[in-house]
Image (cartoon, rainbow, N blue to C red):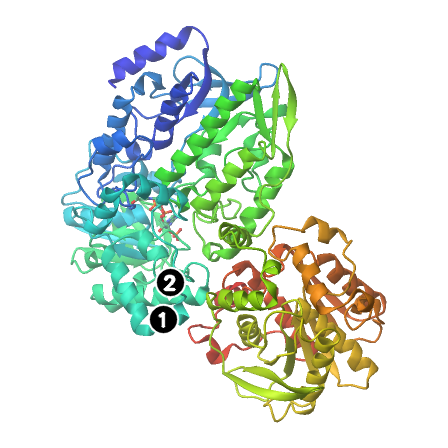
């Protein structure tokens, strides 16, 4: 719209306050779709934008080479199939001018400009409690009064100041990539400096180098970049898209990233070097960030070693592309896992450093000391330049909201103060104390870790649907509760433990802005899961929100929407979607067959030194066992292990992933015992087999390759029961000596009336009814108080030190805690791990429930302590890809 018309429209409003249902800040992707949806929902709205036209980030970022780096087929609105048909992108990655044209086309098609006040900045926003409205002042035209206030400000709209001394003394020209002049910049014949090597720099450097007399790039941290291979949209994506557009879009909405790629299931160590290289070369050639970030192997984003393989392969590519070895080495990132910092898409980036007119300055070796009248001085040299381009990024996410203008909520609370220690939100959409205030792609939402187009549509749909529903029900205010917001913060933290983002200093964490409080701001749980959580909030009666209205009773359905660990939630949702019959309805044989089949589909566990089978003499004939040994030379301390399965299911191999993982972490040898099962062998067979096996293993430790002396015992579930009972029997029957016991979610008592049995009766895989079935098959009611099945009823003094693990969402939780407390009361050294958000199988589901890994680290440390070893195990050649750097140790602990 011409500026004159903008001015005329603003002056129309100058005589009074503009009254609307909803005010929106920003007229980019989010603001435009909001205006469309709000108008369809019958809500009056205005959008305010400092820019002179629509476009948001695409209005401002006009630097040479600016393009999207999600394929444009995916970086589009999807709400209207006719719009989808009406616009065809010319390239795989559209240029900034084309994207701007698209947004203009959308604004015209839905007649959105009439509700936008351009060149208008909100200078203050204040919640008026009496009127239940937001009052906004602007720098151009009438103030605005609105019921709801929505920030569609984007995540990267507040450029960082230069932060380098002397900028104002520089006599040449200074440009910021994020505020590039609209009429372009002629750099021909100029000596140019670019500071920064993020996405904006990597896109612009090759084009600046083509124009400039000389280009000097000042790099603080090298970034991973992938060649875009731009051109027409790739045939495979186009065919997939054209074959069923609706299905394509739906798959994107349910995906982890907002782009329809399947979840990978094969983990890196299951692939040979050749297979991994083939996958990598395919991804490299595909020129697609989402592809390379998600499609190589399943552990690439969650495991340090699985990720490090990619870093190696990319560094090889950089080495091949850049002729000067010193420059190549400086361009190779080593300080962060691939993908933990936003990787870039480039066209000729690395090859640009082969040009004679391009120099790279490595600021890690020679930091910038000052900018002077004529150029830039580092610790080692002075570089004369005519132009400095700051590609130094943004005060991301919070900066885009907080720094725009003061926002004052209920009781005069300022958003800046409330977020002083980092952003706190509910769903990334709302903030406690700020009624009727919404953010689109705010901190706490998947936003920048997703295809923004898909996330924006989801957020806008959810918000507008809620506003319409509130209005229809007679509510005038909506605000999240403290409980809900705190819960979301915890869930965010849980999610961030799964990924590697926490291991990099990036704008995702606020580390790029001096003095900014650090913490991962985007939601890392994925687009599809996030969508289902938002839908769950609605279906559970606006869980976590307080709603009020003048003629309707206030409603507050308080609570936390996600209490499970994120990966536990995914596993349980997947299991629920399979609609399996209850295990107890399958009969004992059927259940065994089911568990065997089920186990075939799980990750097998990582390689260890050796696995061998044998038999040992039990009380009543031979019992099978399986030995798991570390790769490091022995002899190793011996752990006698009892598998889970309710005394009915499983065998000496059925907890193999857990045993392998614990062998790697402890550096100890595990001997898993095939004790006999019910219903053929009822109580006390399993207990007596367990004790007899422990005795034999202790006596034959040396033959088995173990260290002579006291053994340790460990077990999960019913196996935890056998381990606990074994310790009591060993104490009472004269040995063997046991140095410590690891009880993971053990059965310890026959009483079913503890709260955890009721709280977790259904829905968490191990159900109350399944436990009844196990008990019935194993033990008649008359025997159940015998300490050989209910060790909590036995004498607990004088037992070996114990590490007891319990899970929040497990019927067995309270009896595990009771056993730990009983032992501690009798002077047994006991440590407990009460695992929040976990279910009965969390720790056994190695490489599936990733959040279980830190718990297994603690278990391993406890076993090593019991054995008198230092806490850290040398992972040696079992951990073939690793380096023992501090970062590696952090990641190894979490992986
Ligand atoms: O900003 P950045 P950006 N002295 O923060 C360096 C999106 N985007 O504008 O890493 C010296 O990534 C800084 O160094 P370091 C995309 O999501 C998308 O490039 O902090 N150097 C870094 O190298 C992207 O991630 C597209 O050590 C300083 C660079 O400046 C996000 O926007 C295109 C410095 C800043 O990189 C931001 O990208 C462009 C200092 N004082 C952007 N301060 C698409 O293709 C900072 N640096 C869609």
Report if the beta carbon of the residue with label 2 is closer than 8 angstroms to ligand 1.
no
Residue 856, image x, y percentages = 60, 67
Answer whether labels 1 and 2 touch (C-beta < 8 Å).
yes
The x and y percentages for residue 489 are 57, 44
Q: Is residue 825 visible?
A: yes
Instruction: Using the rendered image of the protein, determine whether residue 197 is visible from the camera's viewpoint.
Output: no
Give the side of residue 658 with respect to residue 709, left or right: left
Picture residue at 50% right of the left edge, 56% below the top? 498
> In front here: 576 or 840?
576
Quadrant hosting residue 293: bottom left
Image quadrant where residue 655 sits: bottom right
Q: Is residue 594 left or right of residue 753?
A: left
**Disc 2 residue crowd, few under 14, some 14–19, many 20+, Cα 10 Å:** many
* Callout count: 2
Residue at the image position 23 percent from the left and 54 percent from the top: 349
Secondary structure found at label 2:
loop
Quarter of the figure that contains the N terminus: top left
Residue 490 percent across, percent down from the top left: 59, 47
Q: Position of residue 312 (x, y in %)?
A: 34, 68
Dot 1 surroundings within 10 Å: few (below 14), some, or many (20 or more)?
few
- Dot 1 corresponds to which residue? 271
Between the C-alphas of marks 1 and 2, the distance is 9 Å
Going by the image, does 24 lie left or right of 2? Answer: right
Residue 297, label in figure: 2
| Sequence-earlier tag: 1 or 2 | 1
């Amino acid at each position: 719209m011409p500026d004159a018309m903008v001015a005329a429209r603003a002056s129309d409003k100058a005589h009074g306050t503009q009254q609307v249902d909803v005010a929106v800040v920003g007229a980019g992707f989010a603001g435009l779709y909001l205006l469309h949806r709000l108008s369809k929902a019958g809500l009056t709205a205005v959008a305010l934008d400092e820019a002179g036209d629509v476009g948001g980030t695409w209005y401002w970022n006009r630097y040479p080479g600016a393009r999207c780096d999600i394929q444009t087929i995916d970086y589009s609105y999807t709400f209207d199939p006719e719009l989808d048909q009406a616009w065809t992108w010319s390239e795989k990655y559209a240029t900034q001018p084309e994207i701007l044209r698209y947004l203009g086309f959308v604004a015209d098609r839905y007649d959105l400009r009439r509700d936008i006040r351009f060149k208008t900045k909100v200078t203050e926003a204040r919640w008026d409690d009496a009127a239940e409205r937001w009052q906004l002042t602007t720098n151009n035209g009438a103030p605005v009064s609105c019921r709801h206030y929505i920030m569609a400000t984007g995540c990267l709209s507040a450029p960082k100041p230069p932060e380098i001394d002397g900028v104002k003394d520089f006599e040449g020209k200074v440009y910021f990539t994020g505020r590039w002049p609209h009429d372009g910049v002629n750099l021909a014949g100029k000596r140019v400096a670019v500071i920064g090597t993020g996405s904006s720099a990597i896109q612009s450097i090759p084009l600046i180098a083509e124009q400039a007399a000389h280009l000097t790039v000042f790099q603080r941290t090298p970034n991973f970049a992938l060649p875009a291979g731009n051109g027409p949209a790739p045939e495979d994506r186009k065919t997939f898209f054209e074959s069923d557009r609706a299905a394509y879009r739906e798959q994107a909405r349910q995906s982890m990233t907002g782009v329809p790629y399947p979840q990978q299931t094969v983990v890196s160590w299951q692939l040979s070097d050749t297979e991994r290289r083939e996958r990598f070369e395919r991804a490299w050639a595909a020129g697609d960030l989402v592809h390379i970030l998600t499609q190589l192997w399943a552990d690439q984003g969650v495991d340090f070693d699985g990720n490090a393989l990619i870093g190696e392969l990319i560094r090889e590519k950089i080495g091949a592309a850049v002729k000067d070895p010193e420059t190549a080495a400086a361009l190779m990132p080593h300080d962060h896992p691939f993908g933990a910092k936003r990787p870039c898409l480039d066209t000729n980036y690395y090859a640009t450093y082969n040009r004679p007119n391009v120099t790279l300055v490595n600021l890690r070796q020679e930091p910038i000391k000052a900018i002077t009248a004529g150029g830039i001085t580092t610790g080692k040299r002075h570089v004369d330049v005519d132009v400095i381009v700051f590609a130094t990024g943004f005060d991301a996410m919070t900066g885009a909201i907080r720094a725009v203008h003061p926002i004052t909520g209920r009781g005069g609370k300022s958003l800046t103060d409330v977020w002083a220690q980092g952003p706190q939100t509910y769903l990334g959409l709302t903030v406690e104390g700020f009624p009727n205030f919404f953010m689109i792609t705010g901190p706490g939402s998947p936003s920048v870790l997703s295809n923004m187009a898909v996330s924006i549509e989801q957020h806008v749909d959810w918000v507008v649907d809620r506003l319409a529903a509130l209005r229809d029900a007679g509510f005038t205010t909506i605000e999240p509760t403290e409980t809900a917001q705190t819960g979301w913060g915890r869930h965010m933290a849980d999610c961030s433990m799964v990924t590697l983002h926490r291991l990099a200093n990036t704008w995702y964490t606020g580390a790029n802005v001096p003095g900014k409080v650090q913490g991962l701001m985007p939601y890392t749980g994925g687009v599809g899961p996030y969508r289902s959580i938002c839908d769950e909030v609605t279906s559970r009666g606006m869980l976590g929100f307080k709603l009020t209205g003048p003629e309707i009773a206030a409603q507050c359905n308080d609570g936390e929407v996600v209490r499970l660990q994120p990966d536990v939630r995914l596993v349980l949702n997947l299991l629920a979607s399979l609609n399996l019959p209850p295990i107890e309805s399958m009969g004992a044989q059927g259940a065994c067959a089911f568990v065997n089949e089920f186990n075939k589909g799980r990750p097998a566990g990582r390689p260890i030194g050796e696995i061998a089978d044998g038999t040992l003499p039990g009380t009543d004939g031979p019992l099978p066992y399986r030995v798991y040994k570390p790769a490091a030379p022995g002899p190793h301390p011996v752990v006698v292990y009892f598998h889970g399965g309710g005394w009915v299911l499983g065998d000496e191999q059925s907890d193999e992933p857990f045993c392998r993982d614990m062998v790697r972490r402890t550096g100890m040898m595990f001997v898993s015992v095939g004790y006999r099962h019910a219903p053929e062998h009822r109580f006390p067979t399993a207990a007596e087999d367990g004790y007899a096996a422990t005795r034999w293993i202790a006596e034959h430790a040396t033959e088995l390759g173990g260290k002579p002396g006291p053994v340790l015992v460990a077990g999960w579930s019913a196996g935890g029961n056998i381990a606990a009972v074994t310790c009591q029997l060993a104490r009472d029957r004269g040995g063997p000596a046991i140095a410590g016991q690891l009880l993971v979610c053990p059965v310890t008592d026959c009483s079913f009336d503890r709260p955890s049995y009721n709280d977790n009766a259904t829905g968490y895989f191990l159900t109350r009814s399944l436990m009844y079935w196990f008990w019935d098959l194993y033990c008649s009611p008359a025997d159940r108080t015998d300490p050989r099945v209910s060790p909590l009823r036995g004498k607990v003094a004088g037992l070996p030190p114990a590490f007891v693990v319990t899970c929040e969402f497990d019927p067995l939780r309270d009896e595990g805690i009771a056993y730990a407390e009983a032992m501690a009361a009798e002077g047994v050294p006991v440590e407990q791990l009460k695992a929040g958000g976990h279910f009965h199988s969390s720790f056994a589901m190695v490489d599936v429930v990733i959040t279980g890994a830190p718990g297994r680290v603690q278990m391993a440390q406890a076993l090593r302590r019991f054995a008198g070893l230092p806490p850290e195990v040398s992972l040696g050649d079992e951990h073939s890809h690793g380096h023992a750097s501090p970062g590696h140790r952090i990641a190894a602990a979490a992986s």
